[in-house]
Image (tube, rainbow, N blue to C red):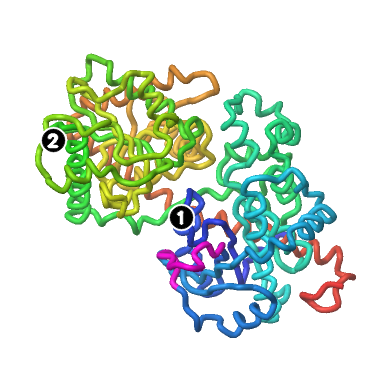
């Protein structure tokens, strides 16, 4: 079937619906407006209710919204809250309490084995929690479908994101075959595990057997669930070409579509006075905190460099970034002051009282505030990998160092006690950002950087980096600095890439303002090509493929149907 099919209803399920914990939140919350504009209230997000006893700032409950169905769902044992996700587009969000399903866990896992041979026997960690939510989310969709008398003609899509929602996709595939299922892996669980366990992923990707590696790394249950779902759903998708190759090797399934991650630029201040004022405010705050912590007098001529992301020390290239900054620190050709920020949330106790006191007094100090490398208290200070690497490299922010490094180990949401500004409100104050990823299926951090007109460095092991190389192939032939410098990274060229980053930062430090402005304009142009308006067609293509596959299934097994939507 080649005819174009589009859904009338879309249910998107993710652990990160109204729950900001990682990059998938950015994917969902930014494409929500584009899909809401197209589907209105027939786009419904389903997430976990983790805030039952307290307010969730990302969710605004509306007790009148779908209230009749909510009563029916409650009679079926579903405890849900219905409202709007507090993001652009304000889509409908249904948050479900999954805890009651724990008492049925063994029966649910037996069902998964009997129907799909999903191995839950070796489960540990967050496996149970994710699956109880996933199953509950599917029951929510099943309840909605039944209550509203939907049929195959309503072209319902269930879009599951990441392994944490796989079980629900499998359940609906079996219990409601009228629904077309789409599964997106944003990073395979076994691929992330191989990379995170210091094993060379790329040199041997062609030779790795996903099942064997899952056994070796004690990942059998997550891998089994993800692999079976990839093969069972109507459309299996991922977010970049590099992850598509990973899926082919480790899940033994080539994705049916690549859903490139876009973004909406509504969080970027309008160009002109608003943008310039926001940048000045961010730089002033970054320098104020740095000077209070360092006992220094860094001025606005200081080059501000940052990296950020989840605390995946190797996968995010944090180890490589620190090494490169140390090389820059020791390079005698550097003549300007450089402030380096490592924005990586860790196990944080809270803001440092001594630093808070200095900031409140708002005066200049000529000595550092304790350990001048960190802004917040952390529980595992002696075991922290970033601090230990800095200790090993003798990086202590000495007075004669042109490069000063500050580790910000908290989520920047505007209430951290030190900066008290959000991540985006501070990001705009940077001059250049570096994200030297080793394992990065997409990479929102460099995309966010260019959205704020900030040149950045990434690698061709990041999906975003590969996309930029395809977008601007002329940059592949140029040495030196580009608006997005995409470095070639392998399992074995750590030192070479570290030197390249150091050289790029050194070159940047010597640029005049005209050349910097040119880079900033080019960065903005790249960002404009990554809006959801450019990428959403990939989603429509995946929906079309899923619905066509569903139609083929229904036609093949139509003798099992009495009426549309009801299976014997």
The residue most toward the left is 363
Q: Is residue 486 above or below residue 554?
A: above
Q: CA distance from mark 2 to mark 1?
A: 34 Å
Callout 1: few (<14), some (14-19), or many (20+) C-alpha neighbours within 10 Å? few
Q: Are marks 2 and 1 in contact (CB under 8 Å)?
A: no
Left or right of residue 186: residue 550: right
Place residue 11 in its image quadrant: bottom right
Closer to the camera in the image, 165 or 476: 165
Which portion, as a residue range, is magenta? Answer: 48-60
Residue 65 is labelled as none
Q: Quadrant of the N terminus?
A: bottom right
Question: Label 2's element?
Answer: loop
Residue at 47% in and 34% down: 316
The percent position of residue 271, horizontal first and vertical second, equals 23, 53
The residue most toward the top is 332
Q: Which residue is mark 2?
A: 299
Residue at 12% in and 45% down: 362
Q: Is residue 257 above or below residue 489?
A: below
Q: Earlier in the sequence, mark 2 or mark 1?
A: 1
The percent position of residue 357, horizontal first and vertical second, equals 18, 45
Q: Which residue is mark 1?
A: 20
Place residue 103 in its image quadrant: bottom right
Left or right of residue 121: residue 297: left
Left or right of residue 446: residue 69: right
């Amino acid at each position: 079937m080649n005819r174009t099919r589009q859904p009338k209803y879309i249910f998107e399920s993710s652990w990160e619906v109204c729950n900001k914990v990682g990059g998938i939140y950015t994917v969902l919350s930014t494409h929500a407006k584009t899909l809401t504009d197209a589907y209105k209230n027939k786009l419904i997000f389903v997430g976990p209710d983790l805030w039952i006893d307290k307010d969730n700032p990302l969710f605004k409950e509306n007790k009148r919204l779908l209230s009749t169905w909510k009563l029916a769902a409650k009679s079926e044992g579903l405890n849900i809250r219905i409202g709007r996700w507090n993001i652009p587009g304000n889509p409908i969000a249904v948050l479900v309490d999954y805890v009651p399903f724990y008492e049925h866990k063994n029966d649910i896992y037996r069902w998964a084995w009997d129907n799909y041979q999903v191995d839950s026997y070796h489960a540990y960690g967050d496996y149970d929690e994710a699956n109880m939510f996933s199953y509950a989310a599917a029951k929510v969709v099943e309840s909605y479908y039944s209550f509203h008398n939907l049929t195959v003609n309503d072209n319902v899509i269930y879009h599951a994101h990441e392994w944490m929602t796989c079980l629900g996709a499998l359940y609906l595939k079996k219990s409601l075959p009228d629904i077309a299922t789409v599964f997106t892996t944003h990073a395979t669980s076994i691929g992330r595990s191989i990379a995170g366990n210091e094993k060379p992923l790329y040199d041997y990707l062609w030779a790795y057997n996903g099942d064997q590696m899952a056994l070796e790394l004690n990942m059998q249950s997550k891998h089994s669930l993800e692999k079976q779902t990839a093969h069972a759903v109507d459309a299996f998708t991922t977010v970049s070409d590099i992850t598509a190759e990973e899926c082919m090797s480790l899940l033994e399934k080539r994705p049916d579509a690549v859903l490139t991650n876009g973004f909406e630029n509504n969080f970027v201040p309008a160009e002109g006075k608003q943008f310039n004022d926001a940048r000045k405010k961010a730089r002033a705050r970054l320098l104020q905190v740095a000077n209070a912590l360092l006992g220094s007098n860094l001025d606005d001529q200081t080059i501000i460099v940052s990296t950020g992301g989840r605390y995946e020390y190797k996968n995010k290239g944090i180890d490589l970034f620190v090494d490169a900054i140390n090389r820059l620190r020791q390079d005698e050709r550097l003549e300007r002051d450089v402030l380096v920020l490592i924005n990586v949330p860790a196990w944080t106790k809270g803001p440092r009282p001594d630093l808070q006191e200095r900031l409140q007094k708002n005066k200049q100090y000529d000595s550092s505030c304790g350990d001048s490398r960190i802004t917040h208290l952390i529980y595992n200070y002696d075991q922290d990998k970033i601090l230990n690497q800095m200790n090993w490299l003798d990086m202590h922010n000495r007075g004669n160092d042109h490069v000063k490094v500050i580790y910000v180990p908290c989520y920047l949401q505007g209430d951290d006690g030190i900066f008290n500004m959000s991540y985006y409100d501070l990001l705009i104050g940077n001059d250049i950002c570096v994200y030297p990823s080793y394992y990065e299926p997409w990479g929102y951090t460099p995309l966010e950087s260019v959205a704020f007109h900030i040149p950045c460095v990434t690698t061709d092991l990041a999906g975003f980096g590969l996309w930029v190389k395809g977008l601007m192939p002329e940059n592949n032939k140029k040495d030196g600095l580009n608006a997005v410098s995409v470095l070639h990274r392998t399992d074995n060229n750590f030192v070479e890439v570290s030197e390249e980053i150091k050289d790029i930062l050194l070159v940047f430090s010597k640029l005049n303002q005209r050349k910097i402005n040119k880079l900033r304009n080019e960065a903005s142009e790249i960002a404009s090509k990554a809006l959801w308006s450019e990428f959403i067609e990939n989603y429509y293509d995946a929906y079309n493929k899923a619905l066509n596959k569903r139609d083929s299934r229904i036609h093949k097994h139509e003798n099992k149907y009495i009426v549309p939507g009801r299976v014997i």
